[in-house]
């Protein structure tokens, strides 16, 4: 994922403009170059160095979580999130204006809401996988608890 993200950012840097958007789905989606010093929706743009430190720390924690994953859905979800986080941390570390203060290269414009990149898409996919996995696991636990409860009630009722 990291290689795809970095390759797509390199292509965006060489082919796209910060001023012109290429409409793919009308005004809903189109490539347009942008540089984000902040986090999601530009939050924290005055503390890029802090976002870099948080990104590096999150990447380490996610790597450890990936090594400890016990289910396929957990490993997949953490893997997507790790890939997305690492893609954006590389920008923070190496992109202009300087080491540890780099702006994230964005190029996927979603209407007038925000402009993101493939690392952001990976983050979203990872969160979705984890949410579905937790929901499914919770549902299975609830069903087995209900079955056990019904089973114990029926044996009591039969006495």
Image (cartoon, rainbow, N blue to C red):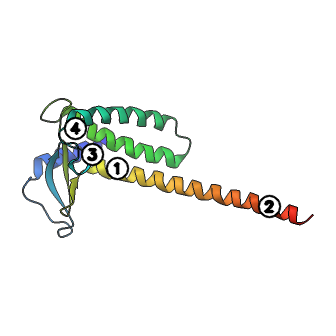
Label 2 residue SS:
helix
Residue 118, position as x, y percentages in the image? 28, 50
> Which residue has dot 3 on it?
5
- Give the foreground label among 4 and 2: 2
Residue 91, position as x, y percentages in the image? 22, 38
- Marks 2 & 3, CB-CB < 8 Å contact: no
Q: CA distance from mark 3 to mark 1?
A: 9 Å
> Which residue has dot 2 on it?
151
Q: Residues within 10 Å of mark 1 (few under 14, many from 20)?
A: many
Residue 130, disc? none
Label 1 residue SS:
helix
Using the image as rendered, state which of residue 134 and residue 156 is in the foreground. Answer: 156
Q: If you read the primary sequence from the N terminus, does the residue marked by circle 3 or circle 1 appear first?
A: 3
> Which residue has dot 1 on it?
122
Give the farthest residue toward the top. Answer: 99
Q: Vertically, is 131 above or below 68? A: below
Q: Which of the image's four quarters has the N terminus? A: top left
Q: CA distance from mark 4 to mark 2?
A: 56 Å
Residue at 12%, 34% (x, y): give it: 97
Q: If you read the primary sequence from the N terminus, does the residue marked by circle 4 or circle 3 appear first?
A: 3
Label 3 residue SS:
helix
Q: If you read the primary sequence from the N terminus, does the residue marked by circle 1 or circle 2 appear first?
A: 1
């Amino acid at each position: 994922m990291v290689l795809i993200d970095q390759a797509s950012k390199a292509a965006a840097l060489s082919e796209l403009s910060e001023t012109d958007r290429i409409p793919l789905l009308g005004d809903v989606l189109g490539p347009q170059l942008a540089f984000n010093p902040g986090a999601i929706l530009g939050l924290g743009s005055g503390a890029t160095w802090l976002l870099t430190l948080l990104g590096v720390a999150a990447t380490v924690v996610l790597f450890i979580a990936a090594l400890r994953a016990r289910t396929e859905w957990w490993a997949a979800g953490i893997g997507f999130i790790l890939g997305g986080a690492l893609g954006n941390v590389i920008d923070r570390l190496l992109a202009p204006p300087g080491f540890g203060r780099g702006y994230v290269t964005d190029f996927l414009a979603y209407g007038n809401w925000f402009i993101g990149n493939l690392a952001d898409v990976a983050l979203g996919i990872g969160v979705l996988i984890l949410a579905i996995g937790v929901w499914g696991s919770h549902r299975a636990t609830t069903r087995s608890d209900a079955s056990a409860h019904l089973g114990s009630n029926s044996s009591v009722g039969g006495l």
